[in-house]
Structures are given as C-alpha cells and as structure tokens.
Amino acid sequence: MDDIHEVLTSLTNQQVGSILATIVDVKGSAYKKEGAMMLFKPDGSQIGMLSAGCLEVDLVERITRLGIGKEPELITYDMRADNDLLWGQGSGCNGVIQVLVEPVDHVLLQHLYRIKKALDNGQKVLIYKELPTENKAMNYWFQTNDAQFGKVNENSTLNQLMQSSNSFTRGTQKMAHSQQAIYFDCYQPKPRLIVIGAGDDAKPIVRLALEAGFRVEIADWREELCNTINFPEANKHYLGFPKELQQQISFHTTDYVILLTHNFQRDKELLSFLIEEPLRYLGLLGSARRTKRLLAGQQPPKNLFSPIGLNINAESANEIAVSVMAELIQEKKKMLKSQEVVDEIC
C-alpha cells in the first residue's frame, strides 16, 4: 500500500490531465494485489507500479495510441493462458486482474490533496468507488476521521453504503440489491519510526527507512547532532531527554522506536518509560547481555527486539542498517497481513 504515498507526494497542480490506474480486483496470482497504484503523467513519466512491467507497457500503449483515460474505465487482463506470449509466463502473474483507470481532473486532484493531508496527519482514509459501466458514470466517496467528501450523484449505490455499518473486505464486491460493483479500500498513514540517538550510525537507518515507506522522526539531547543539516529528510526533530521527549511525543500502537544512544544510563532511562508504551516495535541496539542488564530483572515485553535487526552477521553501519530495516519491514508486513477487513483497519 505504499504506492498511494508515492503518488500523492508527486502531485502538483500541473498533474491535471494525468491518469490514475489502480488494481481493483485480482483472481488468482498476481505480482501485486488490490490497491497497487500508478500515475501516468502528461509528460510520459510514471509513478508507482502495477506489475513486473507487463501491465505498464500495455497501459502506456492504450493511453498514447487509443486515448484511454479520458473517462473512467475498467480494463481486464486475463493472464491465465499458457500459450500467451505477452502475459502469464515469467511475469509473476497468472490470474485475472482488473485495473481501474481514471482521469485526474481538477475535482479529483483537490480530493487527492485532502487525502494526502489526512494521511500526513496520521489519519486513515476509507475509500468507496462505484466502478464504471458503459451506461453509468463512476461515483466515489472518501471518509477520514472527521470528514466525508467525493463525487456522488443522487442515484448512486454509495448513498446507501454511506449510512451502513457493514464490514467490507479490501477489493471489489457486487452489491446484492443492485449488482453494482463497488471497490473498497483503506489508505493508511505511513508507519512512524522514531530513532532516538542522532549519531552517524543513525543516518543510514533513517535513509533506508524513508525509502521503505516509513515516516521517520529523530530525537536526541544534542542539538549539534539532531538537526536538519545531519538529518535533512527526517520528518521531525526532537531535542531533549528523557522527560522532554515524553512531553513532546505521543506514542501510538502503530509506532516503531529504535534506541541508538550508545549510552547505558540514557538507554536505561528511556527504556523505563518506553517499555510501558503500547508500541508496535521497540528495538534496542546492543547485545542480549546488555539488554538483560538494562531490564534489571524485568521480563522483556513481546514488542522488545534486542539485539536489533535480523542476523546477517552485519558489521558496518550500513550493514547494520540493512539488517534493522529487514526486521522492520518484516514486522510491518506481519501487521498488514493481519488487517484483512477494511473496517477493522479503519
């Protein structure tokens, strides 16, 4: 689900005329699943990914030669044929994939801006899209914690769904009373990684975490280390320790925290309150013996990871960063896999 963040980050007012393509239904195997998204810009550049390359090539041809994307349209790719030279073999796709293409007009662009603002503020966004048919225009509706917006006409099936309390699985479903196909999804904010300790070894971790789709915040008590010069891409910088951090940061159940202070006493103070926070992941650099001393007889909680990172015999700062990010990605995927019902996610 990282595609939505990549697409939203690339949006500008000059993107009117772009075409948004979203996988809305998969039957069988596919390289990417429902929710995968791409933006085809007017200048020919592309953001995001739908497959290992096969769908993208065909969509570019359809856009440039056939002119699709001027109106919302549903395209079906059947990749099950063994003798097909274009689809199936070697592509990682052997199923039936439906792709929704829709033009990014001024109205949709403004709605995408609102979605980006909500996600940047840590809110989740519920999506309902009434998939287009030959004789019916597409309607869509977005819901955040405190707002609802979209494009819905009076006869839309979405009017009834807005008032319902039913649970919906990510993907496309047909409504029993109308047989109208509705695509459901939930865009989630980037998971937040808070790195406490702004030494040189934090730099490759911050860089890789940003590339892996995390929102990264850095904290330290040393102003000469924790600043925009050393960490220009970090989303936020916190100065202080440790009471100041408690006052500045509100921790959540989806947060990932890494301790990199290299200072036993400071790690002990930090651990004394972080161990009580409902974090998704709490990583501690150092040996198991050091961690045992830090805990001073306390039972380690299930969310505590130490030594931090997957065991790849890492030695350098860059290698350690790779092992740490591998572990973070592994834990993030476990969390996403457990969230199969949209209303449970949102």
Image (cartoon, rainbow, N blue to C red):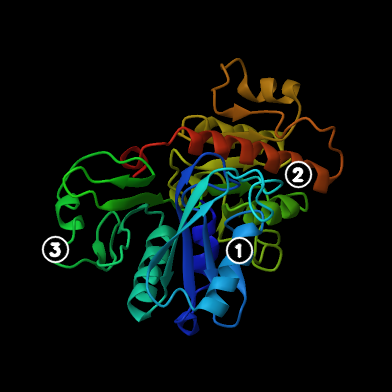
**Tag 1, which secondary structure?**
helix
Res. 99 visible in picture: yes
The residue shown at (65%, 64%) is 227
The residue shown at (65%, 43%) is 82
The residue tagged 1 is 56
Q: Position of residue 333 (x, y in %)?
A: 56, 38
**Tag 3, which secondary structure?**
loop
How many residues crowd around disc 2 within 10 Å: few (fewer than 14), some, or many (20 or more)?
A: many
Question: What numbered label is drawn on residue 155?
Answer: 3
Q: Position of residue 93 (x, y in %)?
A: 61, 46
The residue tagged 2 is 322
**3D distance between C-alphas at marks 1 and 2:** 30 Å
**3D distance between C-alphas at marks 3 and 1:** 34 Å
**Tag 2, which secondary structure?**
helix
- Which amino acid is tagged 3? Asn
Nearest the camera: 307 or 189?
Answer: 189
Of tags 3 and 2, which is closer to the observer?
A: 3
Q: Position of residue 146 (x, y in %)?
A: 25, 57
The residue shown at (73%, 32%) is 310
